[in-house]
Amino acid sequence: MWSNKRHFKAIVGAFAVALLMTGGIAFADDEANGSYRDAGRDLQLGFGLGLVDPEDTESAEIYYSAALRFRIGKSYDEPVWDGDSYRGRPPADTGIRGYLEPEVSYWKGESTGIEDSDLLVGLNLIGVVPTRSADYFLGVGFGVHFLDATVDPSITGPGADLDGSEEALGGNLQVGVDVNIGENIALFGTGRIDLLEGERNEHQTKVYVGIRFKL
C-alpha cells in the first residue's frame, strides 16, 4: 500500500505525539474538574482500522482488527449519566482495571513477487488507567498467526510449488488510549509490536484507530 515506509514512520511519530497531547488534556481536565474516574463497563467491543509494517514486505499494509474485552476483578454500581454529567456516588475502584481481550485481526500485502497474509487469533491481558476524559491502557498478549504466502510463477518457474501455509505463535506489547465521547462509546488509538516465531515477517509494527462500545 504505502510504497515508502518513511510515511509509516511519520504516522507512528504523529500517533505518539497525539497520544501525549491527549494525556495532557485529560489530566488537565481532571485537575480542573476533579479526578472522577468512570467505572467502565464489564464488556467492551472494539473495531479497529490502521496500518501494519511487516518486516519483509515492501510497504505498510492495511490492518483490520476486532476485540472483545471482559472485565476481571471487582465491579461496582455506576453513577447515572443525565446527558451532561454523572449523578450519584463515584465508584470505589479508582485504580487500574483489568480485562481479558480475545482478538481477531488480518492483513494482506505483497513484496518482490510474494503475496503474504496473516490472520491472527489471540488473547490479551489489558490494564486500564481511567481518567475523566480518557482511559489509558497497556497490554501484553499471545496468539496464533495463520500465515499464507503465494509466489509469482514468473519467479519460481513452471511446475514449482507456489503456495505455502503455516501457523506461528506470537506475542505482542501494546499501548493506547480510549477517548470517551459518551457514556457507552469511545474512540481509541493503539500502537503495538508483534513478534512471531519463524523466518518471515517475524517483526510487525502496528498503528490503528477505531471505535469501542462499552456494553
Image (cartoon, rainbow, N blue to C red):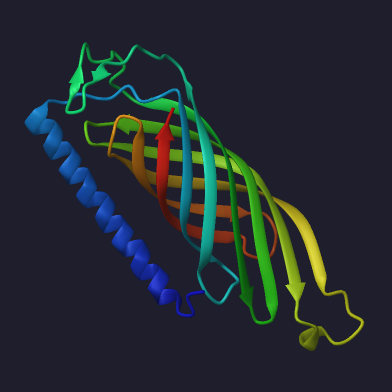
Viewer-nearest residue: 35 or 171? 35
**Is residue 129 found left or right of 64 in the rendered image?**
left
| Residue 12 location, quadrant | bottom left
Q: Work out which quarter of the rendered image holds the C terminus and state it.
A: top left
The residue shown at (28%, 20%) is 94
**Is residue 101 found left or right of 197 in the rendered image?**
left
Q: Residue furthest front?
A: 83
With respect to residue 13, does 98 lie above or below? above
The residue shown at (76%, 76%) is 151
With respect to residue 137, does 191 lie above or below? below
Q: Residue furthest left?
A: 32
The residue shown at (73%, 62%) is 148
| Residue 208 location, quadrant | bottom left
The residue shown at (47%, 41%) is 46
Give percent across and percent down for residue 164: 80, 65
Give percent across and percent down for residue 56: 60, 71
**Is residue 103 found left or right of 86 in the rendered image?**
right
With respect to residue 111, does 76 lie above or below? above
**Is residue 23 found left or right of 8 in the rendered image?**
left
